[in-house]
Amino acid sequence: MAAITARTIEDGMIALERKTIDDLRGRLRGPLLLSGDSGYDEARKVYNGMIDRRPALIARCAGASDVIACVQFAREHHLLVSVRGGGHSVAGNAVCDDGLMIDLSSMRGIRVDPVGRKVRAEPGLTWGDFDRETQAFGLATTGGLFSPTGIAGLTLGGGLGWLHGLHGLACDNLLSADVVTADGRLLTASDAENPDLFWALRGGGGNFGIATSLEYRLHPVGPVLAGELIYPIARAAEVLRFYREFLPGTPDALRTDIGVVTAPDGDLVIGIIPSYVGAIAEGERAVEPLRRLGPSADMVRPMTYLGLQTMLDELLPAGRRNYWKSSILPALDDGAIETLIACGRASPSPTSLLTLEPICGAASRVSPDATAFPHRGDSYSLLLLATWTDPAATDRHIRWARETWEAMQPFTAGRVYVNYLSDGEGRVLEAYGANYTRLAALKTKYDPENFFRVNQNIRPAAEGGGRSAA
């Protein structure tokens, strides 16, 4: 095997000789893949079909010792590194061109403690994997809206989900994490050990290390009442105004998302997805005002929590081309409603969506500086999902998402949920607000060379990280 060319962290290129590559392979329990190897092309695929990057090396780690070996090897050779967990991030930061991709997707161990209501899980798990194990004991924790989402990426970015009104964000339920830091150490982060690192991990994304194990608090979760209520687009303004007044009085157990979508029959509609976690009879009473509003279709029904977690999977399947724009709305005034409807009508794709995801209940009552995730207090996360299949149509769909986002800016708060950032938009300050200065200081402590940079990057304070967000 001839030498291969790889990208350095300084954006240069170096040659890695066969002996050097074989040395890394000998240090790993999992396989090391190069271009042309069986499994290489499958390993570099991620959720977003627009991402087509080719790492020089893909290390499919079998455990924490493999992760440590990869970090040490990358440091020895100054290699650019990306980290893949579930690969569901729309930005595609799991994969880098020409660098070393540290692939955690084979690390899928999980152990549930039903008596202590805790679980220890590895970062290659998806929420579908995780929930199947915890639901065997009637337990769950907040875990996103789609079962293929990876547990690590969602949690480290904050973690909105079906249960966040009742039990807080995924990061609020994180009890500890084992983390390989930029210097190759394996540290435990919790309230008792390395508490500053633990604070940063809960919302700070992949900036501070590679989580090799995550421990969560679990909650009893049985059958839920959930589904979709459909209203004609002609009634969209009426429905959105009703929703605005309805939402503040709802119980923590009821999450209610709303959006402009295309129904299976091709009609543009306004859809509400209520999900009530608790007694079905109580859920029926909580949802009744939405039913009195007169939906044209009512698909709300009792289902298992696993059914809820997989309910939307077919709506946004892997492999489509995706471009997302997002912001946080502090309120839903009439101007925002009118603009949202107009932009929804202009969507060029029947698979694209405009959704409002409420940040409310338990998730909203945590102090903004208690974790790195700062977006507390009742508000709405606005998500514009442009999705399509034809590569030739890419510019048109991206333009719609950007124009819609621009049109909605007068109604936003200059903030954004980091897990919804689609590309290198220079919006990291908006993701962290007042917490950014502390995060930049902790980046200096735990990763002063910005080794972990293929992410929504928080730069070390010494690089100006406290002043800007490139």
Image (cartoon, grey):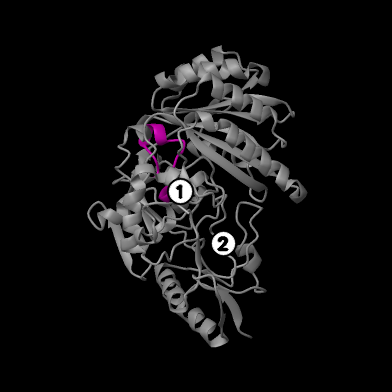
Mark 1, secondary structure of its residue: helix
Lateral position of residue 261 relative to residue 76, left or right: right
Lateral position of residue 202 relative to residue 101, left or right: left
In percent of width and height, residue 5 lies at 60, 78
Amino acid on which the number 1 mark rests in the picture? Val
| Residue 113 seen in render | no
| Residue 99 seen in render | yes
Residue in view at x 48 percent, y 42 percent: 144
Query: On the rendered image, what quadrant is the N terminus found in?
Result: bottom right
- Most foreground residue, 68 or 308: 68
Q: Which residues are magenta?
A: 155-170
- Most foreground residue, 178 or 90: 90
In percent of width and height, residue 128 lies at 51, 47
Residue topped by disc 1? 428
Q: Is residue 166 magenta?
A: yes
Amino acid on which the number 2 mark rests in the picture? Val
Residue topped by disc 2? 95
Badge 1 crowding class, 10 Å Cα cut-off, few under 14, some 14 to 19, many 20 or more, is many
Mark 2, secondary structure of its residue: loop
Residue in view at x 69 percent, y 26 percent: 268
Lateral position of residue 456 relative to residue 54, left or right: left
Residue in view at x 33 percent, y 61 percent: 444
Q: Is residue 343 magenta?
A: no
